[in-house]
Amino acid sequence: QVQLVESGGGLVQAGGSMRLSCAASGSIFSIRAMAWYRQAPGKRHELVALITSDSNTNYADSVKGRFTISRDNAKNTGYLQMNSLKPEDTAVYYCNTNAKIPGSRDYTDYWGQGTQVTVSS
């Protein structure tokens, strides 16, 4: 099994910055993509940013130019650097990874528990 532990959420003023981390642990053979999703009250679950195993990235239009996703493959850890935060970025942020455990033929999606990010105006 693979466990994802997120950290770095909290309260920040509009215009501020915050960095989220997602550490993957457990029996891991390989990790493909790592991604961050978010869900605000009354809104749909949305993809914020994704990074592939060869570091190609993709961002939601709403965060392009403000957020940066990265990963440290040696540490099985992903990061989301969030700058110029806006109140509309307030949401629970979830880490997601597509990983394979030893002995498995397939990759499986794993999710973190979520971390609250609140941006005050």
Image (cartoon, rainbow, N blue to C red):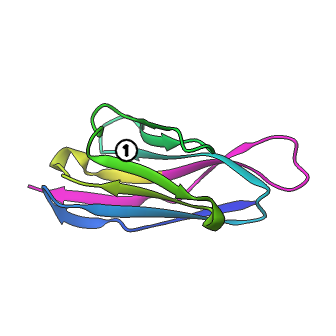
Q: Would you name the residue on which mark 1 appears?
A: 39
Q: Residue furthest right?
A: 103
Q: Which amino acid does label 1 sit on?
A: Gln
Instruction: Indicate whether residue 115 is drawn in magenta.
Output: yes
Residue 64 in the image: x percent, y percent? 30, 37
Residue at x 36% of width, y 34% of height: 60
Residue 62 in the image: x percent, y percent? 27, 35
Q: Tell me how many marks there are.
A: 1
Q: Is mark 1 on a helix, strand or loop?
A: strand
Q: What stretch is highlighted in magenta?
A: 95-121
Residue 102 in the image: x percent, y percent? 86, 56
Residue at x 37% of width, y 49% of height: 68
- Determine whether, in the image, residue 96 is placed left or right of residue 118: right
Q: Where's the N terminus, which quadrant? A: bottom right
Q: Is residue 95 above or below residue 13?
A: above
The quadrant where residue 5 appears? bottom right
Residue 61 in the image: x percent, y percent? 31, 31
Residue at x 17% of width, y 49% of height: 86
- Determine whether, in the image, residue 107 is placed left or right of residue 103: left
- Determine whether, in the image, residue 114 is placed left or right of residue 91: right
Residue at x 76% of width, y 42% of height: 107
Instruction: Indicate whether residue 62 is drawn in magenta.
Output: no
Q: Is residue 14 above or below residue 8?
A: above
- Crowd around label 1: few <14 · some 14–19 · many ≥20 (10 Å): some
Q: Residue furthest left?
A: 121
- Determine whether, in the image, residue 48 is placed left or right of residue 111: left
Q: Where's the C terminus, which quadrant? A: bottom left
